[in-house]
C-alpha cells in the first residue's frame, strides 16, 4: 500500500493544472512533484533550511516561485489556484520545535477554499504526533462542518496504525 504522500501524488497526477500551491514546502518534494503537473507552482515555508533544500531540488525548474514566509500570506501572491498540498507537522531533518499550528493552518485553509477554483482540490496530510493531535482535532471539526453543497470532503487513513498520518481531500464543487 502506498504512503500518504504517494496517495496524494497519485491523485494529483491524474491531470494537469494551471496553478498549484505547496503550502508547506519542507524539503521540496511536493513542490517538485507539482512542477510536473502545473504550469506554475507557488511554494511556502518559514524556514530558510526548507527554502535552501527546495532550491537545490528544483534548480532546473522554471515554473516554481519559492517564498520564505508563512503559507498564511499566500493570498498576497495569487488570486486563484487549482490544486494545493499541505504536509503538516515539522520539517524532516529540521527543527522539530518548529511545527504547524492549527490556528494558522485553519486560517490558511479558509482562505484557500475561497480562492480555490471550481473542481479544484486541497490535499492535507495530517500528522497527529507533533502536537498530541490538537491540530487534527480542530481541522476535522472544520472539515465536518463544510457545506456538502459546496465541497466534497474525504479522509484516507490507515485503520490499524495508531497515530498514523492521514489525508483529507477537499474538492470544491
Image (spheres, rainbow, N blue to C red):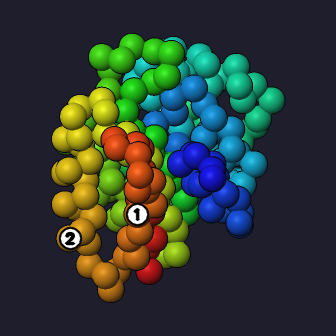
Query: In this view, which residue lies farthest toward the bottom?
Result: 149
Asked if residue 84 lies left or right of residue 98, the reply is right
**Secondary structure of the residue carrying numbered label 2:** helix
Q: Residue at x 36, y 17 (%)?
A: 96
Q: Residue at x 76, y 35 (%)?
A: 61
Q: Earlier in the sequence, mark 2 or mark 1?
A: 2
Q: Give the total number of marks visible in the rendering.
A: 2
Residue that label 2 marks: 145
Asked if residue 112 lies left or right of residue 66, the reply is left
Residue 155's tag is 1
Where is residue 49? Give x, y as percent.
51, 14
- Front disc: 2 or 1: 1
Q: Is residue 20 visible?
A: no
Asked if residue 149 lies left or right of residue 10, the reply is left
Q: Is residue 112 visible?
A: yes
**Secondary structure of the residue carrying numbered label 1:** strand
24 relative to 52, above or below? below
Say which of 140 and 12 sits in front.
140
Residue 112's tag is none
Say which of 68 and 100 sits in front.
100
Q: Residues within 10 Å of mark 1 (few under 14, many from 20)?
A: some
User: Cα distance, mark 2 to mark 1?
Assistant: 14 Å
69 relative to 71, above or below? above
Q: Residue at x 23, y 32 (%)?
A: 131
Where is residue 155? Give x, y as percent.
40, 63
Where is residue 119? Give x, y as percent.
52, 75
Q: Residues within 10 Å of mark 2 (few under 14, many from 20)?
A: few
Where, quadrant-wise, is the C terminus in this rendering? bottom left
Q: Residue at x 37, y 33 (%)?
A: 89
Where is residue 66? Give x, y as percent.
56, 31
Say which of 113 and 27 sits in front.
27
Amino acid at each position: 500500500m502506498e504512503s500518504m504522500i504517494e496517495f496524494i501524488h497519485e491523485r494529483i497526477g491524474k491531470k494537469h493544472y494551471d496553478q498549484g500551491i505547496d503550502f508547506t514546502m519542507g524539503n521540496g518534494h511536493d513542490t517538485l512533484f507539482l512542477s510536473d503537473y502545473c504550469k506554475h507552482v507557488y511554494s511556502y515555508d518559514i524556514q530558510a533550511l526548507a527554502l535552501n533544500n527546495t532550491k537545490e531540488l528544483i534548480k532546473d525548474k522554471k515554473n516554481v516561485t519559492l517564498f520564505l514566509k508563512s503559507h498564511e500570506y499566500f493570498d498576497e501572491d495569487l488570486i486563484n489556484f487549482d490544486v494545493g498540498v499541505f504536509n503538516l507537522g515539522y520539517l524532516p531533518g529540521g527543527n522539530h520545535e518548529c511545527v504547524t499550528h492549527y490556528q494558522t493552518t485553519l486560517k490558511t485553509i479558509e482562505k484557500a477554499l475561497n480562492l480555490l477554483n471550481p473542481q479544484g482540490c486541497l490535499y492535507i496530510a495530517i500528522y497527529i504526533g507533533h502536537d498530541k493531535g490538537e491540530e487534527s482535532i480542530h481541522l476535522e471539526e472544520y472539515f465536518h462542518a463544510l457545506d456538502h453543497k459546496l465541497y466534497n470532503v474525504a479522509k484516507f487513513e490507515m485503520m490499524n496504525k495508531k497515530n498514523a498520518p492521514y489525508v483529507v481531500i477537499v474538492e470544491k464543487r
